[in-house]
Amino acid sequence: MGKPSEHMVPYLKSNQAGHSGGYYVRLSVHDRPGAFAAIATRMAEKQISLESIVQRGRLKRGAAAGGPVPVILLTYATTEALIREALAKVVEDGYIAERPQVIRIERD
């Protein structure tokens, strides 16, 4: 059953930024020379090792060159704080068309 509220204690909030593990990162990258190199450089600056990089074709058939393309990154173990710092720099570099999507990869 339940516990009376006067007997409950505050929970301790988890430190997500300190979580260590792999990450799935989805980017919408402007398709132009140097984009992958800049992204890889920003990851390397934060000691983030990439397990995989997958680029899909342009979303719309006949879309103009230089338009955004989806890019998926899988990282080896790192912290969320380092991922966020690296992605902030990638966004500042101007290669990203939309806000990056980041998902932790939980493994047994």
Image (tube, helix red, strand yellow):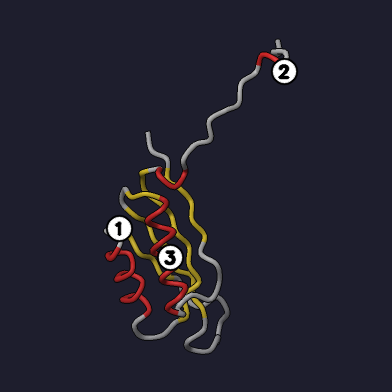
Q: Residue at x 44, y 82 (%)?
A: 31
Q: On screen, 32 above or below 101?
A: below
Report the Cα–Cα distance between label 1 and label 3: 11 Å
Q: Earlier in the sequence, mark 2 or mark 3?
A: 2
Q: Quadrant of residue 42?
A: bottom left
How busy is the neighbourhood of tag 3: few (under 14 within 10 Å), some, or many (20 plus)? many
Q: Residue at x 38, y 66 (%)?
A: 54
Q: On screen, 103 above or below 28?
A: above
Residue where numbered disc 3 is placed: 87
Mark 1–mark 3 CB contact (< 8 Å): no
Q: Position of residue 104 (x, y in %)?
A: 45, 47
Q: Which label was assigned to residue 37?
A: none
Residue where numbered disc 2 is placed: 5
Report the Cα–Cα distance between label 2 and label 3: 42 Å
Q: Earlier in the sequence, mark 1 or mark 3?
A: 1
Q: Nearer the viewer, mark 2 or mark 1?
A: 2
How busy is the neighbourhood of tag 2: few (under 14 within 10 Å), some, or many (20 plus)? few
Residue where numbered disc 1 is placed: 48
Q: Nearer the viewer, mark 2 or mark 3?
A: 2
**Which residue extends farthest top?**
1
**Which residue extends farthest bottom?**
64
- Element carrying mark 1: loop
- Element carrying mark 3: helix
Dividing the image into 4 quarters, which one contains the N terminus?
top right
Q: Residue at x 57, y 28 (%)?
A: 11
Q: Residue at x 47, y 72 (%)?
A: 91
Dividing the image into 4 quarters, which one contains the C terminus?
top left
Left or right of 19 in this view: 45 = left
Residue placed most toward the observer, 61 or 94: 94
Q: Position of residue 6 (x, y in %)?
A: 71, 15
Q: Amino acid at mark 2?
A: Ser
